[in-house]
Image: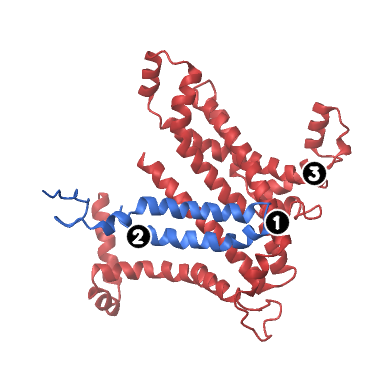
Chain colours: A red, B blue
Amino acid sequence: MNDTSTVRRLATRAAEATPPPVVARVGGLGDRAIAWLFIAPTIVLLLAINIFPLIWTIYLSFTNFRANRPNAAVEWLGTRWYTSILTDPDIWAAMQVTARFVVATIVIQTVLGFLLAVLIDKKFRGHGFWTTLILLPMMLSPAVVGNFWTFLFQPQIGLFNYAVSFVTGLPPSSFQMLGDVSLAPWAIAIVDTWMWTPYVMLICLAGLRSIPDYIYEAAEVDRASKWRQFWSITLPMALPFIMLAVLFRGIENFKMFDMVNLLTGGGPGSTTEVASISLKREAFEKWRTGYSSAFAIILFVTVFGLANIYVKALNRVKQR
Amino acid sequence: MTTRPDPIPGAADGDPAPRRRIFRRGPWENAATGLIALGVIMLMQPFSIELYSWSFATTLAGTVMFIVVSKFPE
């Protein structure tokens, strides 16, 4: 018996097994109504876990609600929390820490990612193996990465300190990557770069592979040097993809929480206290739920705005 | 002798419809994008707390503008 008749037999059996009231109810519906019926559970779920919390957070941001005092009277405060956050020097400082982190990681990751993409784009022996090896960090969970880099940065037993000691001659226990005010931000930048440069490389590689060979062939005919080809063909044509990578990493690093929380928890002092760490402290250590809701909305609007630019850039790349 | 204005893509024949020239998606989207970028820079700059205070309003204006103008015709 072939596959088609098996499917038909199963469909007939399913139709026979359907209770008559259900048949009568569904039988009267149009295609559009049935389509709505199928997507309704997803829409309801989306409204329940995405849209409702967002609207509820917007509401809470205008009140003095505290999650640790759920029975206390809730007072409407208007835009007081927004004014307070947008004039608070500590939150401003957290934004600057975030900015420094975002700029440093984006610059390093973009340069390294693009150079790696140019290297991987050249066909050489074992290039598949090297590509897989480079992509490995990206596939790991940030929690795992945060934990094992904490061990690598240990001053007594950490491999990172021993590697630096081997290169520079400094004693391994003479510096603490996570405990030093000047080194801690760089420790986070190193881990983020290690983990996410492969991602930038992948996007840049897609850009490089989209450049048609005939352009290079025409350049060869015109006796353009390799350097000239790189500046006049490779870089301009891969630029939309690089911009996409920059934007995506910018959005991701703006809301970076897990890695910073695992590695330094915002310390030492407040040198690595990025915006999301401040938000967590306000929400779950000080229990200022209304205040932290307003803070979350400010971060949300910023990320939403950046995401709009991202979508626009993506459309531009698609049109190419 | 009078000259007829060039027809505008998407406009009815003989109707120059200058309104459509103004409300084109491209330049407005660029303006909204610029406003969002300005707001983000204002939020993270280390120079003036006054600029920081206005950053949210700027980003919000840019985002709302982006949502509105993305419905404009090409």
Which chain contains the residue that carries disc 1? A
Tell me the element at label 3.
loop
Quick check: A301 left or right of A173?
left
Mark 3–mark 2 CB contact (< 8 Å) = no
Front residue of this view, candidates A129 and A84? A84
Task: Name the residue rendered at 70%, 40% in the picture.
Answer: A190
Residue A194 image-quadrant placement = top right
Near mark 1 (Cα within 10 A), the count class, few <14, some 14-19 or many ≥20, is many
Near mark 2 (Cα within 10 A), the count class, few <14, some 14-19 or many ≥20, is few
Front residue of this view, candidates B45 and A7? B45
The residue wearing badge 2 is B71
Answer yes or no: are tags 3 and 2 on the same subunit: no
Query: Which numbered tag is attached to residue A94?
Result: 1
Query: Which numbered tag is attached to residue A269?
Result: none
Instruction: Give how far across and how far down residue A12 sits, in percent.
Output: 25, 64
Most extreme residue toward the left is B1
The residue wearing badge 3 is A182
Task: Name the residue rendered at 26%, 75% in the picture.
Answer: A23
Residue A191 to residue A9: above or below: above
- Amino acid residing under circle 2: Lys
Instruction: Give how far across and how far down residue A104 sits, in percent.
Output: 66, 42
Separation of residues labelled 1 and 3 (CA atoms): 16 Å
Which chain contains the residue that carries disc 2? B
Which chain contains the residue that carries disc 3? A
Answer yes or no: are tags 1 and 2 on the same subunit: no
Residue A158 image-quadrant placement = top right
Tell me the element at label 2.
loop
Quick check: A180 left or right of A239?
right
